[in-house]
Amino acid sequence: MPLHPQAEAWLQAAIDARIPPLDTMAPEEARLLRMEQRVRWNLQPDPHIMVENRTVPGPVDSIPIRVYRPKRDPPHSDIRA
């Protein structure tokens, strides 16, 4: 099965930019690289996704989490996942 054209373009851009595989980087490097790519490739957040930053109780302190959900148009906006 062929790749979706957008996925293929993204992979080709990564190859052209000589981006090393993410599993060879420290997490901090990979995060920074991702931020730089968003700026360089002018990637915008998906307008159909709602992002919420929350915390959950941890063994010592609260643990930050990020919840991604699709945005829904009324009348479906009252449906809770």
Image (cartoon, rainbow, N blue to C red):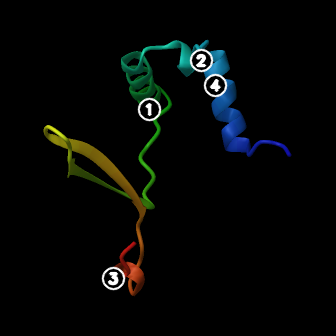
Q: Secondary structure at mark 1?
A: helix
Separation of residues labelled 1 and 2 (CA atoms) = 17 Å
Q: Which residue is mark 2?
A: 21
The image quadrant that residue 44 belongs to is: top left
Q: Amino acid at mark 1?
A: Arg
Q: Is residue 75 above or below residue 42?
A: below
Of callouts 2 and 3, the N-terminal one: 2
Q: Position of residue 50 (x, y in %)?
A: 36, 59
Residue located 83% across and 43% down the image: 2
**Image side of residue 12 versus residue 60, left or right:** right
Q: Which residue is mark 3?
A: 78
Of callouts 4 and 1, the N-terminal one: 4
* Other-residue count near label 2 (Cα within 10 Å), few / some / many at <14 / 14–19 / ≥20: few
Q: Which residue is mark 4?
A: 13
Q: Secondary structure at mark 2?
A: loop
Q: Is residue 33 above or below residue 75?
A: above
Considering depth in this image, is 32 or 64 the residue closer to the camera? 64
Q: Amino acid at mark 2?
A: Pro
Image depth: mark 3 or mark 1 in front = 3
Separation of residues labelled 4 and 1 (CA atoms) = 12 Å
The image quadrant that residue 5 belongs to is: top right
The answer to the question of whether label 3 and label 1 lie on touching residues, with beta carbons closer than 8 A, is: no
**What label does residue 38 carry, if any?**
1
Residue located 23% across and 43% down the image: 64
The answer to the question of whether label 2 and label 4 lie on touching residues, with beta carbons closer than 8 A, is: no
Q: Secondary structure at mark 3?
A: helix
Q: Position of residue 78 (x, y in %)?
A: 33, 82
* Other-residue count near label 4 (Cα within 10 Å), few / some / many at <14 / 14–19 / ≥20: some
Separation of residues labelled 2 and 3 (CA atoms) = 41 Å
Considering depth in this image, is 28 or 14 the residue closer to the camera? 28
